[in-house]
Amino acid sequence: MGRGDLSDEQWSVLEALLPAVGVSRRSGNRRRLVDGVRWRVRTDVRWRDLPREYGPWQTVYGLFRRWQREGIWARLLTLLQGRADAAGLITWEVNVDSTVCRAHQHAAGARRDGP
């Protein structure tokens, strides 16, 4: 298990929410593939640079794209957020950044003297 991979407890929660089908026996176990997707998203490297421990990059990428097209990642996020909210682990407060950036008057791009 890699440094950023899911713990057994985290995997047991996530596995219960995953679709029953979608990974063939030939492609390896889902946990390894999901950890591969998480590693790639966390590091923001090319899919081809995925470490071999997660399986062939084409297989991991294929799982990512298929689940993205089917809306599985969005559904997982919604379900996990719902569970965390029900457990009182999320505070739904709005945070507004009030940073002000001064710009030169010409930065807006509009001419004041007309066309």
Image (tube, rainbow, N blue to C red):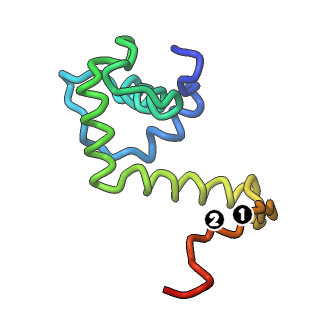
Q: Residue at x 68, y 59 (%)?
A: 85
Dot 1 and dot 2 residues touching (CB under 8 Å): yes
Q: Residue 104, labelled with which disc?
A: 1
Q: Secondary structure at mark 2?
A: helix
In the displayed structure, would residue 103 be above or below residue 65?
A: below
Q: Mark 1: which amino acid?
A: His
Q: Position of residue 22 (x, y in %)?
A: 24, 40
Q: Nearer the viewer, residue 55 or 44?
A: 44
Q: Position of residue 101 (x, y in %)?
A: 76, 60
Q: Position of residue 37 (x, y in %)?
A: 41, 32
Q: Residue at x 72, y 63 (%)?
A: 104
Q: Quadrant of residue 70?
A: bottom left
Q: Mark 2: which amino acid?
A: Ala
In the displayed structure, would residue 79 be above or below residue 32?
A: below
Q: Residue at x 60, y 60 (%)?
A: 82
Q: Secondary structure at mark 1?
A: loop
Relative side of 66 to 46, left or right: left
In the displayed structure, would residue 79 be above or below residue 92?
A: above
Q: Residue 107, labelled with which disc?
A: 2
Q: Quadrant of residue 91?
A: bottom right
